[in-house]
Amino acid sequence: MPGLLRDYFVVLPDSVAGHAVAGRLPVPDTTRTAGGAGGTVTVAHPSGRPWVVARPLVRKVGHLRRGDDALVLIGPDRVPEAVLAGLLEGARDRAGLERRLARLPGLHHVIAHLSGETWIRGTASGLRRIYHARYAEAGTIASDRPAVLAQLTGAPLDDGALALRMLDFLPHPLSRRVLWRGVHETGAGYGLALPAAAPGTAAAPGPREYRWWEPPPPELSLAEGARRLGDAVAASVRAHVGGLDRISCELSGGLDSTTLTFAARATAPAELSLLTVAARDRYSEDETWARRAVEAAHGGHTDTPAPAHHIIPADQAPYFYADLAATSAELNDEPLPVAPGRARAHLLLSRARATGSRYHLTGYGGDELFLGLPHAYQDLFHGNPLTAWNHLSGLRHQLGWPLLPTLKALLNRSTFPHWLAGAVTTEPQPVTRTPLLSWGVRQSLRPWFTDHANALITEEFRAAAAGQAEPIDRWRGRHVDIDAVRMGARHFQAMEDIGMTIGLPVAAPFYDDRVLEAALAVRLEQRISPWRYKPLLVEAMRGVVPDALLARTTKDHMSSDEHQGLREHAPELADLWTGSRLAGHGLVDARQLLRLAAEPFSPVLVEHSISSTVAGETWLRTVENAWSAPHSTLPTSEASL
């Protein structure tokens, strides 16, 4: 079964060759989404040739032209023409337009033509990304989907990039390595400028990247930052579900999902459905807290109808690694480690859609933004060593970090390239009591990786380090925090694509740029604390979420479902490694993986996660059949400027 393309757009040059590319675009298989939604929006160059061709399944396209200048915004809501006019008019250059765009929730792809130059960007959080490739006579074409560019240009797979995706975490800048040769990703926080061809010439200059986003300085107090964060979360939720009559939320019982539940209720939908998946672990607290949240919502004195609570019994929730063949329904931009949990996510979203929901909200991104990673204390130590050590001592005792290794890690001043060169190792994974205060997490190569795969991975890391890779931010903690958010945003793509398969838009408002900026703007020692659970989010939601719910300080995990899934679905895993595509690329030892499938409780699988390898294998099988749909021609019903 061919992979389903989620919605996509391309940006084309103003030329005969660029027009020809528009006729070769792949057609998303909208017949396999519930409702068969879809269609084409074409925004034209002044010449009449296609400039932006978008095929949105759930997102909305807003566009406006004023003389030679034009603006296109692609996001969860259609930006009104009056707002677009206010953004475009008076913006003399890129910087001027960016200042105006900061008034909107940070959820849109932006495509603009100003002063004779086209430029494109996604979001700073990495939720929306930009890719580009060179297409024969047409020159540079850009898209939000690397697979579209690969299909158009005939790009082959890149084994080095594929080997990297078998790691659990792919740090900056290696996360930008696209799976197809000749297709390039523009870094999050950077835009892509496409200069026009000079008069009398056929070819335009090559593309160039520019930086449009910088993280804000951490200067705000907790109180001021909480106000800004609360406003940003509310605005992001409204951008997704404001004005809709039926919406749904995943209410796990955790603080993040509870926050979004009450923020969604504030938009006053006619019907709000809350979905909770019961846990198999009898010690789990999530369901208890979810029920408390529903009781609190029922007890509120508002004109909004009380939400309906749907609890999915634990015995109906699939284990991890269930129905692996179903991952072929979505063609993700890359293999994602969350793929083995697809069946569980599909069940929840299907139940949400069955309630009549028109949009579903999740709390993805909350942990990365509000928990705070230990690496941040490196930053605090530079300006306030006593406070940093006080906080770190509390964390050290909670995590069992020995004193001397903690001091050594805190005083370490290695550069980012030096860390990156040694960020993968053949040694066993570090023990849990190892202090985490560097530029990221060091990872172990898996025992089932081949020597060829190990060589490709280590060379990729060394080459990036030798190229003097620059960190996202000069401060370690901010670098790691932002990289974690961007990594989570990539993983969330899998949820979006599952939602598109069943016809239900899925959103994670915490990945909104305005939410990210509000969190980073708070002084570090107030944003995170070893003695308070997500203090910034708690303070931001006072008055929105009842205080009794904000008092939760625990978080459940589903590691037992993953380990049990290895046993329950051992036959499917064995089938996966029989005729393994990764083995065909020389990257894994299929015989060893077959042995491990028969020994699901092997110490090897306890020490090493197999989820990323499974994701790589299922992704490769999807790519094999991704282009069975015929090429398109532009329909006569297109909307154009």
Image (spheres, helix red, strand yellow):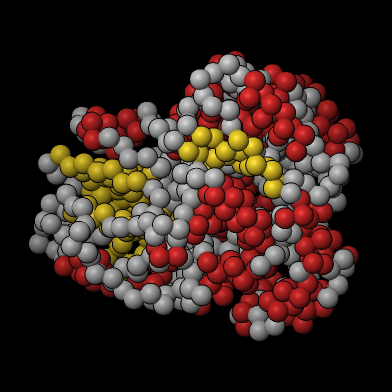
Residue 623: x and y in percent read 51, 73
Residue 268 relative to residue 568: left or right: left
* Closer to the camera in the image, 446 or 515: 515
Residue 525: x and y in percent read 68, 23
- Determine if residue 91 is in view: no
* Closer to the camera in the image, 168 or 388: 168
- Quarter-wise, where is residue 182 in the image? bottom left
* Closer to the camera in the image, 563 or 612: 563
Residue 205 relative to residue 4: left or right: left
Residue drawn at point x = 61 percent, y = 64 percent: 165
Residue drawn at point x = 66 percent, y = 67 percent: 323
Q: In the image, is residue 326 above or below residue 539?
A: below
- Quarter-wise, where is residue 5 in the image? bottom left
Q: In the image, is residue 411 above or below residue 279?
A: above
Residue drawn at point x = 48 percent, y = 77 percent: 625
* Closer to the camera in the image, 462 or 617: 617
Residue 293: x and y in percent read 68, 29
Residue 456: x and y in percent read 63, 71
Residue drawn at point x = 39 percent, y = 60 percent: 36
